[in-house]
Image (tube, grey):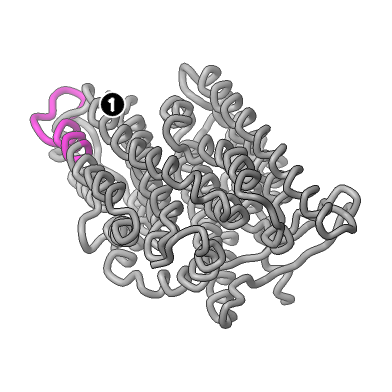
Amino acid sequence: MHSSLWLTMLLVLPVLGALGSFLTREIEGLAFRVAAVVASVELVLAVVVATLYNNHLAGAQTFDFATRHVLASQMGLAYDVALDGISVLLVVLTALVGLLAVVGPRVREREGAYLAWLQLLVAVTMGSFLAHDLLLFFIFFELTLVPAYFLISQWGGAQRDRAAMKFFIYTFTGSAFFFIGILYLGFLHQHQVGGTVTFAYGALAQTAMSAGTATWLFVAFAVAFAVKAPIWPLHTWAPDTYAEAPTGSALTFSAVLAKMGSYGLLRFAVGLLPLALTNVRPVLLTLAVVGILYGSAMACVALDLKRVVAYSSLAQMGFITLGVMSGSQIATTGAVLLMFNHGVITVGFFTLIYFLETRRGTSTIKDLAGLQGPAPVLAGLFTLVMLASIGLPGLSGFVSEYLVLLGTFAVHAWWASVATLGVIGAALYWLWSYQRVFQGDALGANAQMSDVATRERLVLVPVVILIVALGVFPKPVIDMIQPSVHQLVAHVAPSGVSQ
């Protein structure tokens, strides 16, 4: 197969799966089987692409599978996709989450339509990570809003309309600034070199501009990415959305959709606008640290397990932002690895919470107690995922957080020192949540709760394997990330410190 077709297949396959699920929605169970098969093939395809990328990697040229077709030259519109060591992990993560969101937390009400929207969300998210053109990235970035909105508003909880509208307003407003910045950068490049306007990543990276211009463009980009990630204080849509969205959608939002924000910040804001870093780095490092501390504090007082995950994710996105903005190769590598590891851990949390909800009808902490007695396997799986999130050595969360803090401390010691308090905070809120939910005496319905079934355990097998494998032996994945991170950090090195 020609190398350029691999990425196109990754984009087209979930769209076909969405169409198939929608067309078979009237036949009991068939839409689910179609979605499960397509999502499984998508994951296999993503793993194959990741393996082939690793084999083709050569020297400083870290982009592979590149293909570009101009669709409308006067508008600068092109189909331009490529893959590198930063995006390849996120492609695999998107495919993995797409499969687990289908086979894990099922939605029986209008299942065919739900699965169609869910697979469309996977398709446009995949497109965002594959886009090698700024305008194409924006198109996919914006298209995620449509399936996400309908998933929340049609299948969410009691406050779903409010949560969906809040998500829409935040995302759409942030993207307006981003779009203005994209147009300005594209026409600035055209003014300098002549010809038709282009938004190709390689071309825009060579655009000359003043530090002031780069700074306001960076701010325009960063607002959209900060909303999507989310980064404090533009995070307030996330707790409501994660709590109200159906579980399969919530884990997709937190595990994958949020990574579009941190990926966009690294790839397009930092990568295209290095002259802005001197001005914006202190601000974003401060916001990252505040997000870590605020997320940890709010997770400690959250009354619902989904909200604990939401605020925990805010703290973890703070660590990712810290690494992305550090200017350190070590910390940036850790941030990319944390994007993947946090996605896997989040899938584990939301899936386990779904298992709780199906048995007890609630994820409110005060209604749950003593569950490790009647459900020891569920308690054990929750413990593993919890310890990975805390950053226990030997599990995946430790490696990525350690690299972020190690690299950041070498160049920005004060911010790294304060951020370390977030590690302590994670231990506090997760251990306390576990204590309240799983320890103590199980009374009433809690005492009668059944443990996870064999099928449910199988759903979490890939999560457990990745948490352990990337904690014990992360070197192959780090080796895949490092060349691309080195190239990007070297490009922006005159505006920062490379360690």
Query: Is 175 situated left or right of 349 in this image?
Result: right
Does the magenta stretch mainly form a helix, a strand or a loop? Answer: helix
Q: How many marks?
A: 1
Q: Which residues are magenta?
A: 429-446
- Please tell me which residue lies in front, 2 or 200: 200
Identify which amino acid the numbered label 1 is placed on. Ala
Instruction: Confirm whether residue 286 shows in the render.
Output: yes
Instruction: Confirm whether residue 115 shows in the render.
Output: no
Query: Is 405 situated left or right of 351 in this image?
Result: left
Residue 115 in which image quadrant: top right
**Is 168 colored magenta in this rendering?**
no
Task: Say few, some or many: other residues with alpha carbon within 10 Å of mark 1 (under 14 / 14 to 19 / 20 or more).
Answer: some
Query: Is 65 situated left or right of 440 in this image?
Result: right
Which residue bears the numbered disc 1?
Answer: 302
Residue at 12%, 35% in the rendered image: 439
**Is 431 colored magenta in this rendering?**
yes
Q: Position of residue 221 (x, y in %)?
A: 61, 42
Vertical position of residue 421 compared to residue 486: above or below = above
**Callout 1: helix, strand or loop?**
loop
Vertical position of residue 184 compared to residue 297: above or below = below
Q: Position of residue 418 (x, y in %)?
A: 25, 44
- Please tell me which residue lies in front, 155 or 129: 129
Residue 58 in which image quadrant: bottom right
Residue at 69%, 45% in the rendered image: 138
Q: Position of residue 134 (x, y in %)?
A: 70, 52
- Please tell me which residue lies in front, 424 or 178: 178
Quadrant placement of the C terminus = bottom left
- Please tell me which residue lies in front, 199 or 104: 199
Residue that protrudes farthest toward the left in the picture: 441
